[in-house]
């Protein structure tokens, strides 16, 4: 068998054994330190461990991945392979959240072999569809951020003797987290922290719908009962959100003149009240919006806020 045929056979083993059967032990036989020319321009020094890591990342993100060789050409110490990659994007891949989409990617790979049959240089021209997926996801995240930012309050209310300090730091992926303030009669202030399930545009849209309903109901109701407020919003929200989504919410009414806080919770993370160096949970159980058609208005709690600090969070 000629050297060219031997190199073609090594390339075929790499595709069939390493990629299609995840036999990563074979990588040490085929690769030494080598030069990798990336599709987007840079040239990198790589080794067997880099190959194993890359194959592993790909196989985790695309569990049903399969590469089929469409054609092979060998000349001198180089082998060109035209191949097709197929797989379904089930898990995160290099910052891209799983889309559930099937990909079919056609491209070329070139390996240059040493006289000992080791890969010493490579060129690839794949990943155009993955780049399009990444671009689409980035566009969606930009849209979701703009929706989310439009419904967050621009101004923090000022209350004499009280300090309100919201901190909004989104995670890498945009979710449905929100907070807001509602001026009520008698100098009282409504405060809300919540989270719509999911990520991206769907969560941002549910979050914007929820914020709009909260503002409308708080203005129309002007109630002293957080439980009644949560019930009214839930009644309006249930027909408006997808059946596979829900919203959690902590709603409180602060009376700064009395130093009191009335609150209710629709399945949100438990807030904490800090007093004398210790933290106390503000327990108030309730069903998340969208999961229950009726919300129990009796689940309102009361606490004194004199010489205390309240902390509530959203986890997205």
Image: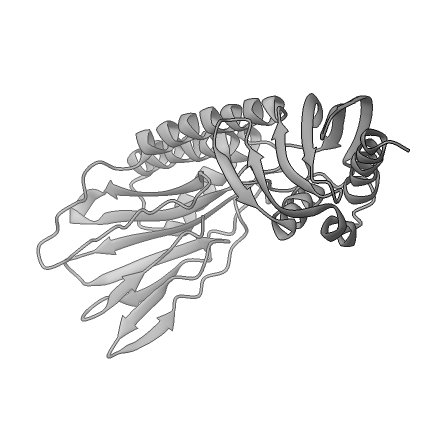
Residue lying furthest left: 160
Answer whether residue 3 is visible to the viewer in this image: yes
Which x, y percent locates residue 14?
78, 40
The one of 105 and 148 positioned closer to us in this rendering: 105
The one of 91 and 1 positioned closer to us in this rendering: 1
Left or right: residue 213 versus residue 199 is: left
Counting the numbered discs, the total is 0
Q: Residue at x 28, y 71 (%)?
A: 274
Answer whether residue 101 is visible to the viewer in this image: no
Q: Residue at x 45, y 62 (%)?
A: 284
Which x, y percent locates residue 88?
72, 33
Left or right: residue 316 versus residue 128 is: left
Which x, y percent locates residue 159?
12, 51
Q: Quadrant of residue 143?
A: top left
Q: Quadrant of residue 221?
A: top left
Which x, y percent locates residue 121?
62, 36
Residue lying furthest right: 1
The one of 15 and 73 positioned closer to us in this rendering: 73
Left or right: residue 91 versus residue 232 is: right
- Position of the N terminus, as image quadrant, is top right
Left or right: residue 136 versus residue 98 is: left
Residue 137 higher or lower than 63, as above or below: above
Q: Quadrant of residue 117?
A: top right
Q: How is the image coloured?
A: one colour
């Amino acid at each position: 068998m000629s050297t060219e045929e031997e190199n073609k056979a090594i390339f075929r083993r790499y595709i069939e054994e390493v990629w299609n059967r995840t036999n990563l032990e074979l990588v040490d036989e085929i690769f030494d330190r080598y030069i990798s020319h990336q599709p987007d321009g840079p040239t990198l020094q790589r080794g067997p461990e880099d190959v194993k890591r890359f194959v592993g990342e790909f196989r985790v993100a695309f569990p049903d991945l399969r590469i089929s060789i469409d054609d092979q050409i060998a000349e001198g110490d180089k082998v060109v392979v035209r191949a097709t990659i197929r797989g379904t994007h089930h898990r995160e891949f290099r910052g891209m959240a799983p889309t559930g989409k099937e990909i079919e990617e056609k491209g070329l790979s070139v390996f240059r072999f040493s006289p000992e049959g080791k890969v010493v240089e490579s060129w690839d021209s794949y990943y155009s569809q993955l780049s399009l997926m990444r671009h689409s996801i980035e566009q969606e995240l930009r849209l979701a951020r703009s929706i989310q930012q439009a419904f967050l309050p621009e101004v923090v209310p000022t209350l004499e003797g009280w300090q309100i300090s919201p901190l909004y730091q989104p995670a890498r992926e945009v979710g449905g987290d929100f907070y807001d303030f509602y001026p009520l009669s008698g100098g009282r202030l409504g405060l809300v922290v919540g989270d719509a399930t999911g990520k991206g545009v769907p969560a941002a849209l549910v979050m914007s719908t929820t914020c709009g309903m909260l503002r409308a109901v708080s203005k129309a109701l002007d109630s002293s009962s957080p439980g009644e407020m949560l019930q009214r919003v839930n009644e309006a929200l249930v027909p408006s959100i997808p059946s596979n989504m829900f919203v959690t919410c902590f709603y409180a009414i602060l009376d700064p003149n009395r130093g009191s806080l009335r609150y209710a919770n629709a399945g949100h993370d438990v807030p904490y009240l800090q007093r004398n160096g210790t933290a106390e949970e503000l327990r108030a159980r309730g069903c998340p919006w969208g999961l229950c058609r009726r919300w129990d208005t009796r689940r309102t709690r009361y606490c004194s806020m004199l010489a205390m600090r309240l902390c509530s969070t959203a986890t997205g």
